[in-house]
Every structure is written in structure tokens, then in C-alpha cells.
Amino acid sequence: MDPFVGRDAELSRLDGWVDGVRRGDGRAVLIEGEPGIGKTTLLRVATARAARAGCQVFWGAGDELGQALPLLPLLDALRVREGDSPRRAAIARLLRGETGTGDPVTAATEQLLALVDDACAAEPVVLVVDDLQWADRATVALWCRLARSTHELPLLLIGITRQVPRRAELLALRRAVGASGVLRVGKLSDSAVTDLVHSLAGAAPGVALRALADGAAGNPLYVTELVDALSRGEALTRVDGHADVTTDHTPATLAAAIAHRLDFLPERVRTVLRAAALLGVEFDLADVATVLGERFTALVDDLEEARAAGVLRESGTNLAFRHPLIRGALYDELPAPVRAAWHRDAARALAAAGAPVHRVAKQFLRAGGARLDDWATTWLADAAPELIAQAPAVAIDLLDRAESHTGALACRLAEALCRTGDTVRAEQVATRALDATTDPDLVSDLHWTLAQCRAMAGRSAESLAALGVALTSPDLSARHRARLLVLTARAHRDLGEVDVAGAVAAEALAAATEADDRWSTGWALHVLIIVTMMRGDVTAALPLFDRALAVTGADPALTDLRLLLQINRAVALGDLDRYDEALAAADQVRRLADDTGSLVRLAQAQSALSELLFDVGRWGDALAEVAAVAEEVKDPGVACCDHGIAAVIALHRGDPDAARDHLRAAEPNAARIGNRVVGSLALARALDAEHRDAPDDALAGLLTCLGDGAEELEEMEELLPEAVRLAVRAGDRGVACYVTGLAEKLAEHSDIPHRVGGALLCRGLLDHDPATLLLAAEHFAEAGRPLPRAQAMHAAAVEFAERGDVGSARAAFTRADDLYETLGARWDAGRLRSELHAHGIRRGPRVKHRQATSGWDSLTPTESRIAGLVAEGLSNPRIAARLVLSKRTVGTHVSHILAKLGVASRIDIAREAAGRYRESG
């Protein structure tokens, strides 16, 4: 049919959106309409024009057969399985389960976002996902995230969907595009139907033919199938330039019209098409030959006849049914038991031919819920790791249908259940499997799964009990003993039992060394490093890092651990106030994590970087790093730390509402990590209590974190000066003395500037000694930490004022106030001014203006540089390369720039920059 008939208005809107993306103005749109109304045909015309105009066009489609397999529409659209770029190859490895880290689907989602970003950096992109109503949840969620990014990218994102089925998650698509982003393709007008019939019949329709066409309710597919059925049945006559009907026997419904078209095909062609229908709307030609057990060349004539009959169309290197309704008609011709048997046979044939796991799995899923036979169970045992990585819910479905729930299959089932969050059943399956096996490899794997499940539920103590029993087995080799001891040490660490964790890790290291097991050696060293740092002896951790990195460097299977070690080494360098090295190390490991597709480690690297940036006073950059990775890929500890940093910054800047949003978001994660202390979160809670005028609650919360044993010295270190300040304010000298003692013990044999500064700050607060406080400020200045430096100057100014030393008070006041203003710490600056004004003291001359909160002057230095590069037309990847930042971080900065400038797109940033240039020039 002619796609232009009656669709001028719709094509005009689509052309306008394409013109916009070519100018860099991205947007997301939904095309809605009933089946057969012409949505897909319309988009194919529009995207062909876009391609001729220089846009890259990517097209994928949801598939009713593949709903259980995450991300397939976008994997197909973005040609991931072709693996023709490092990014695509990394995504393919993730989905095969080869990286062994985190949730592969979540990681692949982030990599797909980056892949789109890469594509947009080259040329404007038009990305279409057809049949979104059949898309899996991961695809729908990713589509929504892409929609939110279109204001930053030259990306025209188009979703095509029916109005039914009305899945709840599809409502999010409408919210993502807004009312202006929905294009409803409605029925053709009467005149358009007449024009379409004229085009199809080759003559103007007569009265009877028009009446029949009117019964198609303006649906162009129905009209097309109706006229075709009449033509094939020789029921049309053409006289004097008019076409009319010569029979009363015409298709009464669209389904009948489609069936009429298929009736004209030879049975051999219909058999080939039924086999194709098993594979979906779009199919690989080789797969059809495989399912039928024939050579491809034997099918060429049959497929060409189906294409000529209007049943099939070309789709890149594949073929596809011209409309899903045609495929449905062929599929439904087969009785359900016959379809199920054919799906099972198709699965076996595809597997024997080496087809990808997801294609084989689709056939099993449609074969019904029957138990898997021996062949299928054997296939599943081999395919399970890849299937668990890409689609754990599918793996669970198939593993549940396997004959055996013991041994390796049970181990894989427990792993899949744990990945999907069904920790209760995962624990049940793993526990039963442990009772039924003595294989030491399986025992180690099952305990690993059990430890993960129980840690997520805050029940690591139960893991310790089970591991204790396992370690009593006399048949354990040194290798397996080492691995179980590593799990034991980690469980003690999760419970905050630092000293015990260290002792067990040392035992694990001895066993691993005896067994020459790199895996256990690396992980045991990792636990020892964490314990050493938590005790506050960061310097002693550095040689442990060197040893662990040497052990892991030669083993690709330990890439994940190596990333983790590099992250912690960056943190350690920051703890030693070696910030240039620390920031460089954190940035390097962030890029390595991104390259390997490890989203869990990427989130941890971003978090470490945000902590370092917070320490050195680059708060805007710290917030960008906190927001650069999606919440769902962060482990609970990282999420708590990130929300804590963001909340602390918001509280210092006088925005308690924003801070409380972060504190609420942190609560579920905090509940999952038990009694572990996360310094930034504890500090945020105390500051929030102080904002609520509840200083006693603030102090009580900090003291709870310090505890009796106070083993986690690294995390508690930043809490000590705040606890002393609050205790002094409350008049509780006993508590202030106790906490000062902790700080001085921590700094006793240390030459780390910030640690010495922390002890001096506590002592100065306790003794009301301005000289000691100024000395503390000097140490913080040497360390490169502006916030505690300002706080020490603040306290010194108050003490000088109390003593009547106005000159010294004003000097300290001025320096503290300048530091607060540089940081944007409006709450602290307000307290400082209030306290000094009460003594009749005003600050000295200002060296800079107050920090703006909106407009161009509110941009941080990094944001200003990025805004300038956006104005020059650079893409996010090019900006990232220029400034040595991650693309995710650049994207976050661009979002902040848009919000601060009050504009909607990158084009608007360029206009603002041009206007600013004109004003200044």
C-alpha cells in the first residue's frame, strides 16, 4: 500500500522531529495506534528519509516470544551481537556471563546507554523500537532512561506501540515523553480510504467496493487485505475507469482477509512459513532451514513465493512477516500440542547447529511446562551460566523443569534465584543441595551463594555457623579450606567484627599460600587490607596492596578482584592525603571498570572518587560523581556512602529538604548492612539532627557509631571532631575527653596531616585553645582539606572573640568565611557570622562575591568548562576525552548545567553561551 495516502500530517511531524535531531535537538516520541493502522510503515518511510539526510538509523522490535529475555529489542537494534566494536564485544561478554561481576543485565543496560552515547557522538541517531507492548521490563526501563537523556544528545528515540495490552510499566513511557511526544495514528479519513482503494485496485472504487472498504473502519491493512482478497478471487471488475465487486462472498474481518491471502499459497510454502512463525516476526533464514532440517538453498523458491505474495518482507539480512497478524494467523493454524512438540524439536535443532543460547531458550519457553528430557537437561547444564547471566528468570523456569535438583544444576538454580532476589528459595535450594553433595567445588559454590543471600538479608551470622560446620570436614583440601575461610572472614567483616575478620583472613592466606591458590590468596589479602585500613593503619596497607595486585595481575579470572583492589588503593592514597595520586588512581580504575563492563566496580570507583572530591572541596564534582551511576547498580554500602555525601553537602549548603531525600533513600540500604559504620551517612544524620535543633540526638547518634570497641577507626575518624564539638556545646566534658582521647590515640604514631589535624581540632575544642585550633587549621591546609580547615578557623575565631582578641578573631573569621563561601557552605557561614556578630565583630574585606545559586555564575569550574565545550558543539564523549572525565560524569554535569541555566537542551546552552559572550564583549 502507499504509505503516504492520508498520512501527510503524521509524516510532517516526523520530518520535523528528524530535522530537529539533525540540528542537535533530541527528543523521545511514542507512535500509538491499533494493529494494521500503518504505524510501522509510516516509520519506515520517515526513517528512510532520515538515513538519506545523514542520520544513523537503528531499528529493533519487541517480540511476544522473547518477553522473558531481557533487552533483546535494543540488543538487536544496536547490532550488539555483531561485536564490531569494543563496546559491543564487552556487552556480548557480559551477557554470556564471562565477566563474573554483579548483575549482567544491569551492567549491559549501562553499556547500551554508553553505546548510544558513542553513536550520537558520531552522527545524529534515530533509534526505533517497534512493538514496545511486547518488550521486556528491562527494555522498557532503558527506553525511559534514554528518553530522559534526549535533551542532552542528538537522539530521536521512537517507540511504536499498540494501545493494548495496557501494561502498567508502559504508562511510564507516556510520562517520559509527555503529551506533546505522543503521535496517535488514527483511522484513515473516508477520502483517504477511497484514494487507497483507487491505488490498490488500479481504478476508482464503485459503490459496492466503497461500501466494503467503509467496513474496514479506516484500517489500511484491512483495506489492503480486502482488496487483495478480491483481486485474487477474481471478484473485482474494472469498467470505464471504475472497480467494483462481483460477489457477495467477501472477508468479514481482518483475520479472514489475511487467511484468504494465505489460502492461495501452496502447502509446501505454508509449511516453510509455519516453521518461520515458530521463530518470531523476524527470523534468520538459516534458522528456518535448521528447524526444517533442510538445506537453505532448498527453501529459496518457497521464501521468494511468500515474499511475492505479500506475506514476507526483507529486514536487513533477515526476512520478516509483513505484519505480526500474518505471522499470528500461521502460528495459530497449528494445534497447541503440535506447536509445543515443534518448538521442542526446533530447540534441539538450533542447539545442534550452534545457535545462540537465547534463541534456543525462546523455543523451550514456548514448548510448554513439560519436564525437560535427558538431552534438554544436558544442554541446560552447559548453557546455564550464560542463561543465568542474561535471563536468570528464564534459567529458573528451565532449571525447575529439569529432572534433577541436586549437584551442579541445583547449584546453578540457587545462583539464579539469588540473582533475581528470591533469596529465601535460593537458600532453601542451596541448603538441600549441600545436604546431598560432598563435591568440594560445589560445596564452595553453594556456600558462596548462601553467604550472599544471608548477607543481603542481614543474616551473616548464620553464614558463620554453616561455614563453621563445613570447615570441620576432614576431607577438605587446603584450596577448599582457604576458600571457605575467605567467606568466613568476609562474613565477620560484614558484621563489623574487624579483629576476628583479620585473624580469619590471615588463616585463609596461609591456607591459600599452601595450596598455591591465586583466587583465595587475592581475596584473603583483600580482607586483610580492609581490616588494616579500618584499624587506621593506612600506611601498612600499601605493601599489602602491592602484594595483592601482583597476585591478581596475571590471572584474567581475577580481573574483578583487581579492580576492587585498585579502588581501595585509591581510597588509601586519599587517606594519606596524597590527593593527586588518589584522584588519578580513582579515575584510572573507573575507566578500567567501564571498559570491562563491571558496573558494580564502576559504581564503587565513582563513589571513591566522589569521597576524594568532597575531601578536597570540589563539591559540585563530587555530586556529579554520586549521580553518574544508576542507584540500582550500587551495592548497599556504596549507596549509603553516596547518599551520605550528597546529604552532607546539602546540609552544609543549607538545603535540609534535599538532604532528607537522600537520607530516606539510604534507609533500605542501611538496613541491609547491619551495624557497619558508614562515616558520611552517620555524619549526615548528625547534621540533620542539628538542623532540626536536636543537638543531643546528633551527639547520641555519633556516640552510637563510635561504640565501645570502636574497631572501624577509618570510618569513625571524620566523626570525632563533630562529636567533640557537640559534647562541648552540651557541656558534657566527660564525653568530649573520651572522644578526644580516641582521636589522639589514632594520631599518636601518625604523620598524616589530616589525622594530626583532627586530633588537634578535638583538643583545641576541648581546651578552648585558639592556638591549638589554628595549628589544626594549618595541618588541614597541608592535607588539602578545606572544610575541616574552615571549621578549625571558625572555632578559633569564636575562642578569640570569647577572649576579647578582636583582631585575631576578625582574621580567623575572615579566613573561615572565605573558605565557607568557596565551598558554598551557607549553613556554616551563617552560624559563623551569627556567633561573631554576637560579639560585635564583623569580618574583614571580602576577596570574592557571594556564590550564585542559579545562572551562569552558579556553575562550578568544571561545569563552566563543560558548558563552553558544549557550546563549541562537542559531544559528551569528546568532552570526556578532553577533560579526562567519564562520559557518565559529563552527562551528569550537563544535566546540572541545564538545571542551573533553566534551559532544556544543548542548543539552549550554546545560545546562553553566545549571549554571555556578547554581553561581555
Image (cartoon, rainbow, N blue to C red):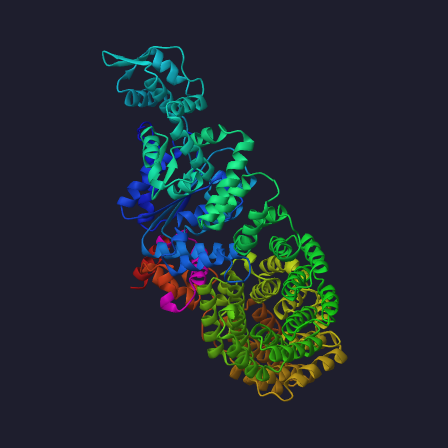
Residue farthest to the left, as pictured? 240
| Magenta stretch: dominant secondary structure | helix
Magenta stretch encompasses residue 492: no
Is 665 displayed left or right of 88 in the figure? right
| Residues drawn in magenta | 881-907
On the image, which quarter does residue 86 sit in? bottom left
Q: Is residue 209 above or below residue 415?
A: above
Residue at position x 52%, y 34% from top? 339
Mark yes or no: residue 66 visible. Answer: yes
Q: Is residue 231 above or below residue 483?
A: above
Q: Quadrant of residue 833?
A: bottom right
The N terminus appears in which quarter of the rendering?
A: top left
Q: Residue 883 in magenta?
A: yes
Closer-to-camera residue (137/665): 137
Is residue 353 shown above or below 811? Answer: above
Residue 351 is left or right of residue 677, and the answer is: left
- x then y, percent, for residue 389: 53, 55
